[in-house]
Amino acid sequence: METETQLRIRDEQILALQKEVTEVKDQLEGVETSKRRSLCLARERVEQWKKTQQQKPLPKKDRQLQTLMEGNESMTSDNQTETGPQVPLDQTVHLETDGGIETAIEGEIETEVQA
């Protein structure tokens, strides 16, 4: 059977550990709050960047590309043009290239380098 002194020491250790756990939980909450705030700020910066990009006039190459893409919208019924078959923009296409695969998704080209 434990003595009164041993019980008091054990209770003090338990209280110290509980206090330490509470402090760690508070620190974690602070980190989570900071991460959420950073993520929110990053999203706002991206939205601002998108808005500024939409307001800028397109460079000549991009205007030409936009004109070509608008031309592709008026394809013939058999999905053929003078340059060959066209793929609808909602399909994914894989093209083998020198160093990777180019994937066209909804009109955007992303280049992935193969390992």
Image (cartoon, helix red, strand yellow):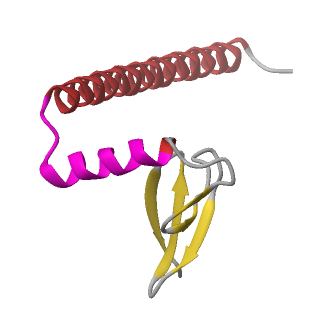
- Image height of 11 relative to 43, above or below: above
Q: What residue sits 63% from the left and 56% below the top?
A: 92
x, y (%) of residue 95?
56, 74
What secondary structure predominates along the stretch shown in magenta?
Answer: helix
Q: Which residues are magenta?
A: 56-72
In the figure, is residue 103 to the left or right of 51?
Answer: right
Q: What residue sits 23% from the left and 23% below the top?
A: 51
Residue reaching furthest right?
Answer: 1
Looking at the image, which is closer to me, 1 or 29? 29
Looking at the image, which is closer to me, 100 or 5? 100
Q: What residue sits 40% from the left and 41% below the top?
A: 70
Task: State which quadrant residue 86 falls in.
Answer: bottom right
- Image height of 76 relative to 14, above or below: below
Looking at the image, which is closer to me, 31 or 76? 76
In the figure, is residue 85 to the left or right of 38?
Answer: right
Q: Is residue 10 magenta?
A: no
x, y (%) of residue 5?
65, 16
Q: Tell me the quadrant of the picture where the N terminus can be found.
A: top right
x, y (%) of residue 91?
65, 51
x, y (%) of residue 62?
23, 49
Q: What residue sits 35% from the left and 21% below the top?
A: 40
